[in-house]
Image (tube, rainbow, N blue to C red):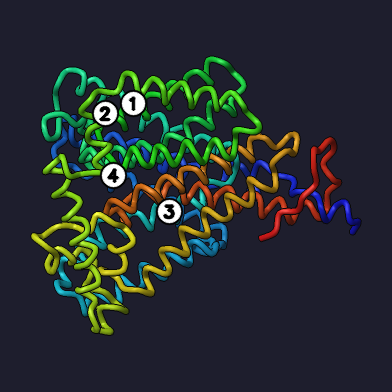
Amino acid sequence: MSDSVQSAPARVVVVRGESADRQSFAYAGLLIFTVLLYLRPNEWLPIGTFPIVRIVALASLAAFFVEQLSDGRPFTIMPREFKYLLVLGGLMVVGMPFGLNPSDSFGKFNEEFLKVFLIFMLTINVVTSLRRLFHLMELTVLCGTVIAVGTLVLYASGENLAEGFRAGGLVGGIFGNPNDLALALNILLPIAIGLGVIRGNWFVRLLYWGCAGCLALASLAAFSRAGFLTLVGIAGFLLLKLGRRYPILWGVAIAGALLLLMLGPGAFWKRIFTVFDSSGDIGAAQSGEIRWALIKRAFEVAGFNPIRWMLGVGVGNFHIVSNFERAHHNSYLQVFNEVGLPAMIAYLAFMYSTARNSGRIAKAYDGVRGYRQVWLAAVMIEAALVAYAVGSFFASVAFLWYLYYPAAFAVCLKLLVLKSVRKADRSEVPRRVWNLRRLQF
């Protein structure tokens, strides 16, 4: 093989499997499940507790497994990130009998992590093309925008306010309180911005940039300090990654900052500045003291007990030994205390692997003509993972949906690129490239 072929970035194929129509029913079920997960029809339709979301999920999984078995394929592909999740889930199950309340642990595992795990597995198996990947990302952004717009409407009318002044989510679940709402919307924000850049049609571009604006405004309306810090982190990351290619982003960022400074209500800035000085705000000072006390309590609970270090107190059991029945407000400590140090290592490895692969794909395709969509997809997925890494430092959401959709996007993109790496060995070098770099995994 020539040196030029070895140094060229991989050619991306649009389909990972043998046929673009593989697992069509399961993929359609995944799309429907995503809509139901975000919009939560049980809260606003007269269907009571009818388990429509669970039925759609089980039907999609059944269709997936039936087609896999009928074609003689294994139950699932096994990328590295999926193995990390297997380890994390396995440690949860092993640690249940040693937990403080095994029945509570089983309920939390079944209601939270098992659903996340199965849908993550379904996603990485049925999203077999760039077209499917982009459609799924577009759907999550549009669903999140519906929540954001509804939240802003209620906020403007003075309804559904937490603490009398903070916007609450239009629905419950992962939008249940202002901090969770801000985290969920912030994760979708860079994806919306990227979709606006990718699309060629100006109407569609404006649509997704409008979605990004609604997501950002609803996040700010939550008056969440963690949400604001996450927004700052997203802005810095995107300027670092995209500012050289799109200098207009610097102007947009400066204009947005100036508008926020001039139009942001005094109550918003008073709350945000308590991050640096909470002496003048009793509530903020108490909140800061509580969080520090919970951090200390997290290590006191582990103590010198090897079982607590290795297997934790059980999923969902930390409140039993916490201060005043409070959660951690930190996903990393949540995994450490509830499942143990090995589980926290698997959790961090999962996060690092997804973000690292997205970063390497973005670096490999930066400046390669004809592959701008791949580069932008990698950048916006990486930015979403960065948003989660920052925001989850202030919330106990390790086993909920926030992380696992963008992580699944990252794995799907990696699998598409890996398939193209193998094909590139038998293909000609792409013409008209700005630079030649090889993507190594």
Q: Is residue 305 visible?
A: yes
Q: Quadrant of residue 270?
A: top left
Query: Please, is residue 204 above or below residue 243 in the view?
Result: above
- The kind of residue tagged 4 is Phe
**Residue assigned mark 2:** 221
Q: Which residue is located at x 75 percent, y 34 percent?
A: 369
**Distance between the alpha carbons at the discs numbered 2 and 1:** 6 Å
**Mark 1 and mark 2 in contact (Cβ < 8 Å)?**
yes
Identify residue for label 1.
Answer: 217
Q: Nearer the viewer, residue 202 or 220?
A: 220
Q: Disc 3 to disc 4, how far (Cα)?
A: 38 Å
Q: Residue at x 31, y 58 (%)?
A: 331
Quarter of image, res 338:
bottom left
**Mark 4 highlights which residue?**
276
Q: Which residue is mark 3?
A: 120
* Secondary structure found at label 1: helix
Q: Nearer the viewer, mark 3 or mark 4?
A: 4
Q: Nearer the viewer, residue 69 or 327?
A: 327
Judged from the image, the secondary structure of the residue bearing numbered disc 3 is: helix
Q: Is disc 4 in contact with disc 1, using a CB cutoff of under 8 Å?
A: no
Which callout, 4 or 1, points at the residue further toward the start of the chain?
1
